[in-house]
Amino acid sequence: MKPFVRGNRKVLAAVGAVVLVAVATWAAYTFAYTADQMDWDCGGGSCATNDPRSFAMPLALLGTVGAVLLSGYAVGLIGPAITIALPAWFFRMGVLDAVEAGFSPEGSVTPPMVVTTIALIVAAVCAVAWIPMLLGDLRVRRRVRERERSAA
């Protein structure tokens, strides 16, 4: 089993990242859509609920962090860009769908939109930073091929 894992670490990390980002995306949308449908007990400066759907947000955050780490190892900066953007986008869609369905008031949209916009900007920065890394990698590969040809 060890030789299989050693030879396929990046593939296994990529598969793990896909699974985690799928869970994070589902959890982010679920929490955003159902947050105002849960019974919250707010008092003493904090809010709490015993609704199991409330675990969706921590699950989304932890899944996103795990997916960012695994995808960064597997494919470079484009992985974190995608794994940050997907849950943020689906969280945004969950909030908008909840408002459209009448579950959330329109005034509650601003804070989640600001947070998701920041997350999408971070994802865009990762994607833009990935381009020079990709070009440098392609340049190195071309030089290696040229040296192999000249040595032969």
Image: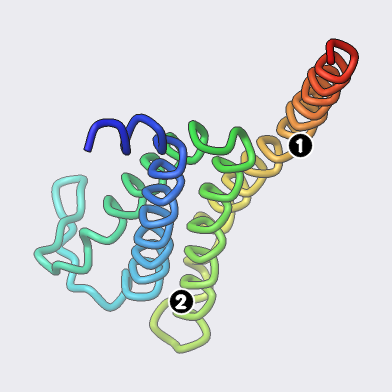
| Amino acid type at mark 2 | Pro
| Drawn side of residue 120 relative to residue 95, left or right | right
Q: Tell me the SS state at disc 2.
A: loop
Comparing 23 with 147, the one in front is: 147
Query: How far apart are the alpha carbons under marks 2 and 1?
Result: 36 Å
Where residue 62 sits, quadrant-wise, is top left
| Amino acid type at mark 1 | Val
| Drawn side of residue 55 relative to residue 150, left or right | left
**Which quarter of the rendered picture does the C terminus lie within?**
top right
Instruction: Residue 64 in the image: state x and y as whole percent.
Output: 41, 47
Residue contact at pointers 2 and 1, CB within 8 angstroms? no
Mark nearer the viewer, 2 or 1: 1
**Which quarter of the rendered picture does the N terminus lie within?**
top left
Residue count near mark 2 (Cα–Cα under 10 Å), binned few <14, some 14–19, many ≥20? few
Compared to residue 125, the image places residue 91 above or below, namely: below
Judging by the rendered image, the residue that carries numbered circle 2 is 105
The residue under the point 41% across, 51% down is: 15
Judging by the rendered image, the residue that carries numbered circle 1 is 128
Where residue 110 sits, quadrant-wise, is bottom right
The residue under the point 71% across, 33% down is: 130
